[in-house]
Image: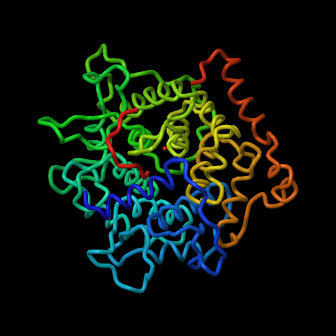
Amino acid sequence: MNVRRTVAALSVSAALCGAAVAPAASADDSARPKGLYGAKDPKFDGVWRQSLALLAQDAVGVTPAKSAVDWLAGQQCADGGFAAYRADPAKACGPKTGEFTDATSAAVQALAAVGGRSDAVEKGIGWLKRNQNDDGGWGMNPGGPTDANSTSVAVGAFAAAAKDPAKITAKKGGKNPYDALLGLQLGCAAKAGERGAFAYQPDKSGEKDKLAANSLATVSAALAAQGKGFVFEPVGNDTRKSPKPMDCEGGDGGARTPAGAAQAALGHLSTALSEHDAHLMSTMPGAKDQPDFGATADAVMALAAGKHSAAAGKPLQWLQRKDSGAVAWAKGDPGALGKLILAAYATGSDPRSFGGVDLVRQLNATGPKPEAAAGSGAESSTKAKKDDGDDGGMNNVWWFVGAGAAAGIGIGFLLSGRKKQQF
């Protein structure tokens, strides 16, 4: 991994994947590129955070500002790929521009969601197809070794563009993204507590490739193996059963299909969440022992997509708690706010009443004024109450969790540090 890639990956990880970092310094609109959300330096995460912001707004009925959509579309290179950020979009892209899978896939999802940008979406899809590895997956950079995170966000891009990921096959060998993901899942040969988890990449430091369980890879792959991207319709009524750990009595645990792999990963996540007060811990290299808010939000989405609303309820409730620090972590950061909004949306919860805070209002305030904001009247009438930090939407979540308990049911996700750390 070259130095540039390492720095970019770690910087984006710290910003978006849950590490407790100091709030970004404020900046007035004159210092911000026109249309861009967020005040901090966009060098490492401009496209990523803009994509999450637009996805979150669209999901909750907010029509993003045209300048915001134009900014994102304007970051695309002529070949269809996206870099983390281009300070001068008028300058043609070249080998040093740094186009990469994660930014391209996130941008495709966002532009597909807001509509009216079909040409940009198709160009992005074309870039992804041209840079697919022979094993069916994608690395962070074109030609780089396949990893679970980049492959997962690419799956989301194809799903958003209404293309079946299973039919996106490599030119050589005919493998698809699910083939690549299944090759990164820990099976019955792993320790009992790691079965069903995903590795970021095989560890090639020894004589044999080894897989090390990684929480960020697991939440990403658990969603992608279900054929889902960052946004999907809330499931609504489901079986409300908590996912079960991989059953290895039959040999491979039944996880050799995408659906089976997803359920095995969800079973692993449910156990991991229960071991840490309903949240995941940071696996970033060098990070202190601390919660990973972004990964916990991703876990909520993956569990909700898998029709495990009871299991998704408890980490969602933890994110809303004042003492968790999640709302404070997200304040002023459009990417982090987008993650929490999408987690709430996936479970059918109200992101405008999230632990006493209106996340949608906060997100809208980080960039250009939206063209239209659904529920704006309600936002205005309750602003003071929510900003004071009352229990707001907590009652809804406690009802959600309590209802599952009353029914006798146990209450049990992209960028990452790119390191093969264990839970």
The quarter of the image holding the N terminus is bottom left
- In the rendered image, residue 375, in percent from the top left (x then y), is placed at 78, 57
Residue 55 coordinates in the image, percent (x, y): 56, 58
Q: Residue at the spot x=32%, y=41% of the render?
A: 420
Rendering coords of residue 67 (x, y %): 60, 77
Count of marks overlaid on the render: 0
Quadrant position of residue 171: bottom left
Where on the picture, by quarter, is residue 264? top left
Residue 261 shown left or right of residue 273 in the figure = left
Residue projecting furthest to the bottom? 90
Query: Residue 12: horizontal and vertical position, in percent?
Result: 45, 58
Q: Residue at x 50, y 27 (%)?
A: 270
Q: Residue at x 46, y 56 (%)?
A: 160
Write the residue at 22% across / 60% down.
143
Query: In this orientation, which residue lies closer to the viewer: 71 or 87?
Result: 87
Q: Quadrant of residue 244?
A: top left
